[in-house]
Amino acid sequence: MTSSSTLKRRVINPDGNIGTFYNIYRDEVLDQSASIDKYEEIQSYKPVHCEFIDDSIEEFQNLLKWINIEGDLRVNILLKSELRTGVAALIDHQYKIDKYTRIMHYFCMYHERRILDNSTEAREHCKPIPNDLLATHIISAVSF
């Protein structure tokens, strides 16, 4: 996989596996049966990201943007066209946000699994996208 053909996206739906079909507009994993068992695993030593904000910071007004959720997905979450699970549930908090509220964003990534770099072998393991499936992408890597 070259970086020019790979789109990195923080998703709300944690159910995706390598090779599964994905609809980027609805953050929806479409077909778990297409999962690929052959992948390479990479140990990642990226630095941990930890940040605090309070109500005096502009990011406080748009928490989903602050945690790098793309604009189209933020709109879907706000319009409730998507389930508000995981980090998306942040906007459904039940407590009043005021000058005493502090929010911490903690993000770390230790592993990445991705489709093999050998394109011939990767093609053998990938299934074609069925026409009736509204897939826009195939998940080619998962970081955790």
Image: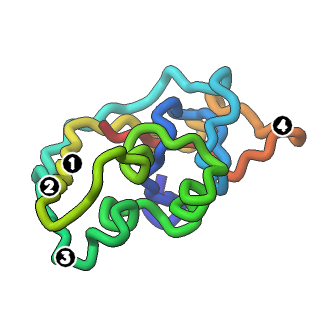
Tag 1, which secondary structure?
strand
The answer to whether mark 4 and mark 3 are in CB contact below 8 A is no
Place of residue 78 in the rendered image (x, y in percent of width and height, measured from the top left):
55, 59
Tag 4, which secondary structure?
loop
Tag nearer the camera, 4 or 1: 1
The answer to whether mark 2 and mark 1 are in CB contact below 8 A is yes
User: According to the image, label 1 marks what residue?
Assistant: 107
Who's the residue at 63% across and 41% down the image? Answer: 28
The answer for how far apart the CA atoms under marks 2 and 4 are is: 39 Å
- Few, some or many residues within 10 Å of mark 1 (<14, 14–19, 20+): few
Who's the residue at 19% across and 43% down the image? Answer: 44
Q: Quadrant of residue 36?
A: top right
Tag nearer the camera, 1 or 3: 3
Query: Disc 3 residue type?
Result: Ile
Place of residue 71 in the rendered image (x, y in percent of width and height, measured from the top left):
51, 69
Query: Disc 2 residue type?
Result: His
Tag 2, which secondary structure?
strand
| Disc nearer the start of the sequence (2/3) | 2
| Disc nearer the start of the sequence (4/1) | 1
- Few, some or many residues within 10 Å of mark 4 (<14, 14–19, 20+): few
Who's the residue at 40% across and 39% down the image? Answer: 86
User: According to the image, label 2 marks what residue?
Assistant: 49
Q: 10 or 64: which is nearer to us?
A: 64
User: According to the image, label 3 marks what residue?
Assistant: 57
Place of residue 99 in the rendered image (x, y in percent of width and height, measured from the top left):
15, 67
Q: 57 or 93: which is nearer to us?
A: 93
| Disc nearer the start of the sequence (1/3) | 3
Tag nearer the camera, 2 or 4: 2
Tag 3, which secondary structure?
loop
Q: Quadrant of residue 143?
A: top left
